[in-house]
Image (tube, helix red, strand yellow):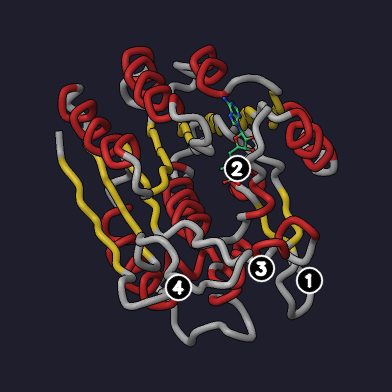
Amino acid sequence: MFSYRHAFHAGNHADVLKHTVLIATLQHLLQKDAALTVLDTHAGAGLYRLDGDYASTSAESADGILRLVPPAAPAALAPALQDYVDMVRAFNQGEATRVYPGSPFIAQRLLRAQDRLKLFELHPTDARALAGNVAQLDAGRQVAVLAQDGFEGARQFLPPPSRRALVLCDPSYEIKSDYARVQDMLQDALKRFATGVYAVWYPIIPRPEAHELPRRLKTLAQKAGKSWLHATLTVKSGKTAPAGTAPGRRPGLPASGMFLINPPFTLDAALRAALPQMAELLAQDRHAAWTLEGGAP
Ligand code: SAM
Protein backbone atom coordinates (compact mmCIF):
# COMPACT_ATOMS: atom_id res chain seq x y z
CA MET A 1 0.00 0.00 0.00
CA PHE A 2 1.22 3.48 -0.80
CA SER A 3 2.36 5.73 2.00
CA TYR A 4 2.23 9.00 0.03
CA ARG A 5 -0.58 11.24 1.28
CA HIS A 6 -1.01 14.52 -0.51
CA ALA A 7 -2.38 16.14 2.68
CA PHE A 8 1.24 16.41 3.91
CA HIS A 9 2.14 18.50 0.87
CA ALA A 10 -1.07 20.41 0.04
CA GLY A 11 -0.40 24.01 -0.94
CA ASN A 12 3.37 23.61 -1.28
CA HIS A 13 5.41 25.21 -4.08
CA ALA A 14 4.73 22.26 -6.39
CA ASP A 15 0.98 22.74 -5.93
CA VAL A 16 1.39 26.47 -6.68
CA LEU A 17 3.01 25.63 -10.02
CA LYS A 18 0.67 22.74 -10.89
CA HIS A 19 -2.56 24.47 -9.93
CA THR A 20 -1.62 27.78 -11.58
CA VAL A 21 -1.02 25.85 -14.81
CA LEU A 22 -4.25 23.88 -14.35
CA ILE A 23 -6.37 27.00 -13.87
CA ALA A 24 -4.82 28.90 -16.80
CA THR A 25 -5.26 25.85 -19.05
CA LEU A 26 -8.88 25.28 -18.05
CA GLN A 27 -9.77 28.95 -18.40
CA HIS A 28 -8.61 28.83 -22.00
CA LEU A 29 -10.33 25.54 -22.81
CA LEU A 30 -13.61 26.72 -21.31
CA GLN A 31 -13.87 29.65 -23.66
CA LYS A 32 -15.47 27.35 -26.25
CA ASP A 33 -19.04 26.22 -25.61
CA ALA A 34 -18.46 22.58 -26.61
CA ALA A 35 -18.35 20.21 -23.63
CA LEU A 36 -14.98 19.46 -22.06
CA THR A 37 -14.01 16.24 -20.27
CA VAL A 38 -11.36 16.53 -17.56
CA LEU A 39 -9.59 13.33 -16.51
CA ASP A 40 -7.62 13.63 -13.27
CA THR A 41 -5.64 10.39 -13.19
CA HIS A 42 -4.27 10.88 -9.63
CA ALA A 43 -6.88 12.96 -7.83
CA GLY A 44 -5.97 12.79 -4.13
CA ALA A 45 -8.57 13.63 -1.46
CA GLY A 46 -9.81 16.78 -3.20
CA LEU A 47 -9.88 19.14 -0.20
CA TYR A 48 -7.27 19.67 2.52
CA ARG A 49 -7.14 21.54 5.80
CA LEU A 50 -3.95 23.55 6.09
CA ASP A 51 -4.34 23.66 9.87
CA GLY A 52 -5.04 19.92 10.17
CA ASP A 53 -2.74 17.24 11.57
CA TYR A 54 -1.39 16.17 8.19
CA ALA A 55 -0.56 19.59 6.83
CA SER A 56 1.02 20.90 10.01
CA THR A 57 3.36 17.89 10.22
CA SER A 58 5.50 19.43 7.52
CA ALA A 59 3.74 22.80 7.08
CA GLU A 60 4.80 22.89 3.43
CA SER A 61 2.02 25.35 2.65
CA ALA A 62 3.86 27.96 4.75
CA ASP A 63 6.45 28.13 1.97
CA GLY A 64 3.83 27.80 -0.75
CA ILE A 65 0.32 29.25 -0.93
CA LEU A 66 0.62 30.99 2.45
CA ARG A 67 3.33 33.27 1.05
CA LEU A 68 0.84 34.50 -1.57
CA VAL A 69 -2.29 35.19 0.49
CA PRO A 70 -3.05 37.72 3.24
CA PRO A 71 -1.38 38.72 5.47
CA ALA A 72 1.72 37.96 3.36
CA ALA A 73 0.00 38.81 0.06
CA PRO A 74 2.30 40.73 -2.27
CA ALA A 75 0.86 43.86 -3.87
CA ALA A 76 0.60 42.90 -7.52
CA LEU A 77 0.59 39.41 -8.91
CA ALA A 78 0.75 38.29 -12.53
CA PRO A 79 -2.79 37.48 -13.76
CA ALA A 80 -2.30 33.68 -13.76
CA LEU A 81 -0.91 33.72 -10.23
CA GLN A 82 -3.67 36.07 -9.08
CA ASP A 83 -6.30 33.72 -10.56
CA TYR A 84 -4.72 30.86 -8.59
CA VAL A 85 -4.74 32.86 -5.34
CA ASP A 86 -8.35 33.92 -5.97
CA MET A 87 -9.31 30.29 -6.54
CA VAL A 88 -7.80 29.15 -3.23
CA ARG A 89 -9.31 32.13 -1.39
CA ALA A 90 -12.75 31.24 -2.79
CA PHE A 91 -12.67 28.09 -0.63
CA ASN A 92 -12.02 30.14 2.51
CA GLN A 93 -14.19 32.48 4.52
CA GLY A 94 -12.62 35.31 6.48
CA GLU A 95 -8.98 36.37 6.54
CA ALA A 96 -7.23 33.08 7.20
CA THR A 97 -6.49 30.51 4.49
CA ARG A 98 -7.29 27.19 6.18
CA VAL A 99 -8.73 25.15 3.32
CA TYR A 100 -6.78 24.14 0.24
CA PRO A 101 -8.54 22.82 -2.88
CA GLY A 102 -6.83 20.01 -4.73
CA SER A 103 -7.05 19.58 -8.50
CA PRO A 104 -10.55 17.94 -8.42
CA PHE A 105 -12.13 20.88 -6.62
CA ILE A 106 -10.26 23.48 -8.66
CA ALA A 107 -11.46 21.85 -11.88
CA GLN A 108 -15.02 21.34 -10.66
CA ARG A 109 -15.36 25.00 -9.68
CA LEU A 110 -14.44 26.09 -13.20
CA LEU A 111 -16.48 23.55 -15.15
CA ARG A 112 -19.87 24.29 -16.66
CA ALA A 113 -23.03 22.14 -16.69
CA GLN A 114 -22.07 20.49 -19.99
CA ASP A 115 -18.57 19.45 -18.84
CA ARG A 116 -17.54 16.20 -17.16
CA LEU A 117 -14.90 15.41 -14.53
CA LYS A 118 -13.54 11.88 -13.95
CA LEU A 119 -11.44 11.48 -10.84
CA PHE A 120 -9.19 8.45 -10.32
CA GLU A 121 -7.75 7.73 -6.88
CA LEU A 122 -6.27 4.37 -5.94
CA HIS A 123 -5.55 4.87 -2.24
CA PRO A 124 -8.65 3.58 -0.39
CA THR A 125 -8.55 6.23 2.36
CA ASP A 126 -8.10 9.11 -0.09
CA ALA A 127 -10.68 7.64 -2.49
CA ARG A 128 -13.19 7.51 0.39
CA ALA A 129 -12.34 11.06 1.46
CA LEU A 130 -12.62 12.25 -2.15
CA ALA A 131 -16.00 10.55 -2.64
CA GLY A 132 -17.24 12.13 0.62
CA ASN A 133 -16.00 15.59 -0.39
CA VAL A 134 -17.47 15.28 -3.88
CA ALA A 135 -20.83 14.14 -2.46
CA GLN A 136 -21.10 17.52 -0.67
CA LEU A 137 -20.99 19.26 -4.03
CA ASP A 138 -24.23 17.74 -5.23
CA ALA A 139 -22.71 17.72 -8.70
CA GLY A 140 -24.78 14.76 -9.91
CA ARG A 141 -23.48 13.09 -13.04
CA GLN A 142 -20.95 15.82 -13.72
CA VAL A 143 -18.32 14.34 -11.41
CA ALA A 144 -17.39 10.66 -11.12
CA VAL A 145 -14.99 9.27 -8.50
CA LEU A 146 -13.33 6.05 -9.62
CA ALA A 147 -11.28 4.10 -7.07
CA GLN A 148 -9.12 2.68 -9.84
CA ASP A 149 -5.65 2.89 -11.31
CA GLY A 150 -5.66 6.22 -13.14
CA PHE A 151 -3.05 5.23 -15.74
CA GLU A 152 -5.32 2.42 -16.96
CA GLY A 153 -8.65 4.01 -16.14
CA ALA A 154 -8.14 7.22 -18.14
CA ARG A 155 -7.72 5.28 -21.38
CA GLN A 156 -11.33 4.08 -21.38
CA PHE A 157 -12.55 7.70 -21.67
CA LEU A 158 -10.39 8.63 -24.66
CA PRO A 159 -11.56 10.00 -26.97
CA PRO A 160 -14.48 11.60 -25.11
CA PRO A 161 -17.81 12.06 -26.96
CA SER A 162 -17.29 15.82 -27.40
CA ARG A 163 -13.69 15.23 -28.58
CA ARG A 164 -12.38 17.85 -26.15
CA ALA A 165 -10.41 16.76 -23.09
CA LEU A 166 -7.78 17.78 -20.59
CA VAL A 167 -5.88 14.95 -18.92
CA LEU A 168 -4.03 15.91 -15.74
CA CYS A 169 -1.50 13.26 -14.76
CA ASP A 170 -0.10 13.92 -11.29
CA PRO A 171 1.31 10.72 -9.78
CA SER A 172 3.16 10.62 -6.47
CA TYR A 173 6.16 8.87 -8.15
CA GLU A 174 6.59 6.76 -5.03
CA ILE A 175 7.10 3.78 -7.25
CA LYS A 176 9.93 4.09 -9.75
CA SER A 177 7.74 2.59 -12.47
CA ASP A 178 5.43 5.66 -12.33
CA TYR A 179 7.87 7.53 -14.61
CA ALA A 180 7.60 4.88 -17.33
CA ARG A 181 3.87 4.55 -16.81
CA VAL A 182 3.38 8.28 -17.44
CA GLN A 183 5.23 7.95 -20.73
CA ASP A 184 3.30 4.80 -21.74
CA MET A 185 -0.02 6.38 -20.88
CA LEU A 186 0.72 9.49 -22.93
CA GLN A 187 1.94 7.46 -25.88
CA ASP A 188 -1.25 5.43 -25.86
CA ALA A 189 -3.47 8.47 -25.16
CA LEU A 190 -2.02 10.36 -28.13
CA LYS A 191 -2.83 7.39 -30.39
CA ARG A 192 -6.40 7.27 -29.11
CA PHE A 193 -6.93 11.02 -29.01
CA ALA A 194 -4.26 13.10 -30.71
CA THR A 195 -5.88 16.48 -30.06
CA GLY A 196 -6.31 16.10 -26.28
CA VAL A 197 -4.51 18.46 -23.93
CA TYR A 198 -2.15 16.54 -21.63
CA ALA A 199 -0.56 18.02 -18.50
CA VAL A 200 1.99 16.04 -16.47
CA TRP A 201 3.48 17.10 -13.14
CA TYR A 202 6.83 15.58 -12.07
CA PRO A 203 9.33 16.15 -9.24
CA ILE A 204 12.85 17.38 -10.02
CA ILE A 205 14.90 15.19 -7.71
CA PRO A 206 18.30 13.49 -8.00
CA ARG A 207 17.02 10.38 -9.71
CA PRO A 208 17.73 9.58 -13.38
CA GLU A 209 14.09 8.79 -14.20
CA ALA A 210 13.00 12.25 -13.01
CA HIS A 211 15.47 13.97 -15.33
CA GLU A 212 14.70 11.69 -18.25
CA LEU A 213 10.92 12.07 -18.08
CA PRO A 214 10.65 15.59 -19.60
CA ARG A 215 13.22 14.64 -22.27
CA ARG A 216 11.19 11.57 -23.16
CA LEU A 217 7.93 13.52 -23.23
CA LYS A 218 9.51 16.10 -25.51
CA THR A 219 10.61 13.37 -27.91
CA LEU A 220 7.14 11.85 -27.75
CA ALA A 221 5.49 15.19 -28.58
CA GLN A 222 7.94 15.90 -31.39
CA LYS A 223 7.51 12.45 -32.96
CA ALA A 224 3.73 12.83 -32.78
CA GLY A 225 4.00 16.30 -34.40
CA LYS A 226 2.46 18.02 -31.37
CA SER A 227 3.20 21.31 -29.66
CA TRP A 228 4.54 21.17 -26.10
CA LEU A 229 5.39 23.43 -23.18
CA HIS A 230 7.69 22.67 -20.27
CA ALA A 231 7.73 24.84 -17.12
CA THR A 232 9.95 24.28 -14.08
CA LEU A 233 10.08 25.98 -10.71
CA THR A 234 13.03 25.63 -8.33
CA VAL A 235 12.75 27.05 -4.83
CA LYS A 236 16.05 25.88 -3.35
CA SER A 237 19.20 23.91 -3.92
CA GLY A 238 18.67 20.19 -4.55
CA LYS A 239 21.71 19.24 -2.47
CA THR A 240 20.96 17.32 0.73
CA ALA A 241 20.59 19.25 4.00
CA PRO A 242 23.86 20.41 5.52
CA ALA A 243 25.29 18.59 8.54
CA GLY A 244 23.74 19.91 11.74
CA THR A 245 20.25 20.35 10.25
CA ALA A 246 17.79 19.68 13.05
CA PRO A 247 16.35 16.15 13.02
CA GLY A 248 12.83 16.21 11.67
CA ARG A 249 13.66 19.08 9.27
CA ARG A 250 13.63 16.91 6.19
CA PRO A 251 15.12 18.61 3.13
CA GLY A 252 11.86 18.52 1.15
CA LEU A 253 11.27 18.84 -2.57
CA PRO A 254 13.52 21.49 -4.18
CA ALA A 255 11.85 21.77 -7.59
CA SER A 256 9.20 20.41 -9.91
CA GLY A 257 8.00 20.69 -13.47
CA MET A 258 4.88 20.67 -15.61
CA PHE A 259 5.04 19.24 -19.11
CA LEU A 260 2.13 19.87 -21.45
CA ILE A 261 1.34 18.42 -24.85
CA ASN A 262 -1.06 20.48 -27.01
CA PRO A 263 -0.99 23.35 -24.49
CA PRO A 264 -3.32 26.33 -25.02
CA PHE A 265 -1.45 28.89 -27.13
CA THR A 266 -2.06 31.49 -24.37
CA LEU A 267 -0.23 29.49 -21.69
CA ASP A 268 3.34 30.42 -22.65
CA ALA A 269 2.72 34.15 -22.15
CA ALA A 270 0.71 33.60 -18.97
CA LEU A 271 3.51 31.52 -17.42
CA ARG A 272 6.28 33.81 -18.66
CA ALA A 273 4.69 36.53 -16.53
CA ALA A 274 3.88 34.31 -13.52
CA LEU A 275 6.98 32.09 -13.18
CA PRO A 276 9.50 34.84 -12.28
CA GLN A 277 7.13 35.96 -9.52
CA MET A 278 6.69 32.40 -8.28
CA ALA A 279 10.47 31.93 -8.12
CA GLU A 280 10.92 35.24 -6.31
CA LEU A 281 8.08 34.88 -3.83
CA LEU A 282 8.59 31.18 -3.06
CA ALA A 283 12.41 31.25 -2.95
CA GLN A 284 13.93 29.34 -0.03
CA ASP A 285 17.53 30.12 -0.97
CA ARG A 286 19.53 31.82 -3.71
CA HIS A 287 19.10 28.83 -6.04
CA ALA A 288 15.45 29.69 -6.74
CA ALA A 289 14.84 29.78 -10.50
CA TRP A 290 12.38 29.03 -13.26
CA THR A 291 12.49 27.84 -16.85
CA LEU A 292 9.99 27.81 -19.69
CA GLU A 293 10.60 26.09 -22.98
CA GLY A 294 8.23 25.12 -25.72
CA GLY A 295 8.03 23.74 -29.20
CA ALA A 296 5.64 23.90 -32.15
CA PRO A 297 4.72 20.85 -34.26
N1 SAM B 1 -3.73 15.76 -8.24
C1 SAM B 1 -3.92 16.02 -6.83
C2 SAM B 1 -3.98 17.53 -6.64
O1 SAM B 1 -3.37 18.26 -7.41
O2 SAM B 1 -4.67 17.96 -5.70
C3 SAM B 1 -2.81 15.43 -5.98
C4 SAM B 1 -2.51 14.01 -6.27
S1 SAM B 1 -1.22 13.29 -5.33
C5 SAM B 1 0.21 14.06 -5.95
C6 SAM B 1 -1.12 11.67 -6.07
C7 SAM B 1 -2.29 10.78 -5.68
O3 SAM B 1 -2.28 9.63 -6.54
C8 SAM B 1 -2.23 10.22 -4.27
O4 SAM B 1 -3.42 10.55 -3.59
C9 SAM B 1 -2.12 8.69 -4.45
O5 SAM B 1 -2.83 7.97 -3.47
C10 SAM B 1 -2.73 8.50 -5.81
N2 SAM B 1 -2.27 7.33 -6.59
C11 SAM B 1 -1.06 6.70 -6.55
N3 SAM B 1 -0.99 5.78 -7.54
C12 SAM B 1 -2.17 5.85 -8.22
C13 SAM B 1 -2.67 5.20 -9.37
N4 SAM B 1 -1.95 4.26 -10.04
N5 SAM B 1 -3.90 5.54 -9.82
C14 SAM B 1 -4.64 6.49 -9.18
N6 SAM B 1 -4.22 7.15 -8.08
C15 SAM B 1 -2.99 6.84 -7.61
Q: Give the image location of residue 136, x and y in percent.
A: 85, 43
**Can residue 154 be seen in the rendering of this structure?**
yes
Whichever of callouts 2 and 1 sits on the residue coming sooner in the sequence is: 1
Nearer to the camera, 47 or 240: 240
Would you say the beta carbon of the disc 3 residue lies within 8 angstroms of ligand 1? Answer: no
Q: Are marks 3 and 4 in contact (CB under 8 Å)?
A: no
Residue extending furthest toward the front: 243
Would you say the beta carbon of the disc 4 residue lies within 8 angstroms of ligand 1? Answer: no
Which residue corresponds to mark 4? 282
Residue type at mark 4 is: Leu
Res 137 → quadrant: top right
Which residue corresponds to mark 1? 93
Residue at position x 39%, y 67% in the image: 235
Q: Is the residue marked by circle 3 packed among few (<14), some (14-19), or many (20+) residues within 10 Å?
A: many
- Between the residue at mark 1 and the residue at mark 3, the CA separation in whole angstroms equals 8 Å
Q: Give the image location of residue 63, x and y in percent.
A: 54, 71
Whichever of callouts 2 and 4 sits on the residue coming sooner in the sequence is: 2
Q: Give the image location of residue 290, x and y in percent.
A: 29, 63
Q: Are marks 4 and 1 in contact (CB under 8 Å)?
A: no
**Can residue 35 be seen in the rendering of this structure?**
no
Whichever of callouts 3 and 4 sits on the residue coming sooner in the sequence is: 3
Comparing labels 3 and 2, the label whose residue is closer to the camera: 3
> Under tag 1, what secondary structure?
loop
Q: Which mark is residue 89?
A: 3
Residue at position x 54%, y 68% in the image: 64
